[in-house]
Image (cartoon, helix red, strand yellow):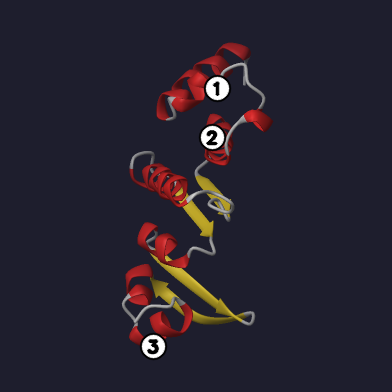
Amino acid sequence: MELHEIKDRVEEVTGYYPILKECYGRQASTMSGGERQMLAIAMALIRQPNIMLFDEPTANLSPKMSIQVFEEIRKLRDDLGKTVMLVEQNAINALKCGDKALLLVSGKIAFDGQANDLLNSPELGQMYLGLK
């Protein structure tokens, strides 16, 4: 990618995350956890990937910021047409965000199907998601 293309992509991507414009000139280490997650997503988007992988994107974030990160992941899928693979301990919010789910228990597949089916499964929901 040439320099002008990179600048164009940065401008486009920061349009998705206006908070990052407020962070120009700051080191990432001075940003909040949520701001750093948005920065990481923006950095990945500059390369125009078709698939985005997330490993615990809400780890160590406040509940409010976790909700915002899930919203941004939904936007990647719905608005930008990205395929998203998500590994997340916050299973209920991840399932609400996703289309398909894979539940691993002791390294074995306990469920492979639609996210809503797992959310609505009384047995699996109670046993693995804490739902009643």
Residue 30 % position (x, y)? 65, 29
- For badge 1, the amino acid type reads Cys
**Residue 123 - label:** 3
Q: Is residue 116 above or below residue 44?
A: below
Q: Secondary structure at mark 2?
A: helix
The quarter of the image holding the N terminus is: top right
Percent x, y for residue 63? 45, 52
**Label 2 or label 3, whichever comes before in sequence order:** 2
- Answer with mark 1 or mark 3, whichever residue precedes in sequence: 1
Give the residue number, with chain letter if any, for mark 2.
35
Q: Amino acid at mark 3?
A: Glu
Q: Position of residue 89 (x, y in %)?
A: 54, 64
Q: Is residue 120 left or right of residue 67?
A: left
Residue 9 can be seen in this image: no
- The residue indicated by pointer 1 is 23
Q: CA distance from mark 2 to mark 3?
A: 37 Å
Query: Which one is nearer the viewer's eye here, 16 or 113?
Result: 16
Category of crowding for the residue at label 3, using alpha-carbon neighbours closer than 10 angstroms: few (below 14), some (14–19), many (at least 20): few
Residue type, mark 2 in image:
Glu
Element assignment for label 1: loop
